[in-house]
Image: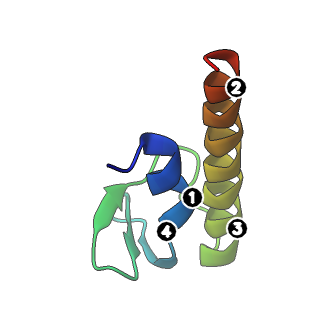
Amino acid sequence: MENILEKMEKNTIKVVSIDTENMTYTCDDGNEYPLMDGLENLSVEELQKHIDNARKTTIDILKNIEEDNG
């Protein structure tokens, strides 16, 4: 069974559009997510960079937890 870390490492989110009127963004898998206040002026590329950085940080945290738990 896959653990959370393995799932995070396999899954990537690719932003394809931002809807500032409805405060959402859409990914290439068709899923729509809420856009946090203050991010509505970002380009798709800028939002993608923030999401990628958050994913990397989450993976790093999960790796540290796994290491601490042996």
Residue at 67% of width from left, 35% of height from top?
63
What is the spatial separation of the Cα atoms under label 3 and label 4, in whole angstroms? 13 Å
Residue 37 in view in this figure: yes
Q: Looking at the image, is mark 3 or mark 4 earlier in the sequence?
A: 4
Residue 36 lies left or right of residue 60; in this view the side is left
* Residue type of the residue flagged with mark 1: Glu
What is the spatial separation of the Cα atoms under label 4 and label 2, in whole angstroms? 26 Å
* Circle 3 or circle 4, nearest the eye: 4
Q: Which residue is mark 4?
A: 13
Task: Determine whether label 3 and label 4 are within 8 Å by CB.
Answer: no
Element assignment for label 4? loop
* Residue type of the residue flagged with mark 3: Glu
Query: Relative to residue 2, is residue 16 depicted above or below?
Result: below
Element assignment for label 3? helix
Q: Which residue is mark 1?
A: 9
Q: Which residue is mark 3?
A: 46
* Circle 4 or circle 2, nearest the eye: 2
Residue at 51% of width from left, 65% of height from top?
10
Where residue 59 sits, quadrant-wise, is top right
Query: Relative to residue 20, is residue 35 depicted above or below?
Result: above
Residue at 43% of width from left, 53% of height from top?
35
| Residue neighbourhood size for the residue with mark 4, other residues' Cα within 10 Å, grouped as few (<14), some (14–19), many (≥20) | some
User: Going by the picture, which residue comes out furthest to the front?
Assistant: 70
Q: Residue 27: x, y in percent?
A: 40, 75
What is the spatial separation of the Cα atoms under label 2 and label 3, in whole angstroms? 32 Å
* Residue type of the residue flagged with mark 4: Ile
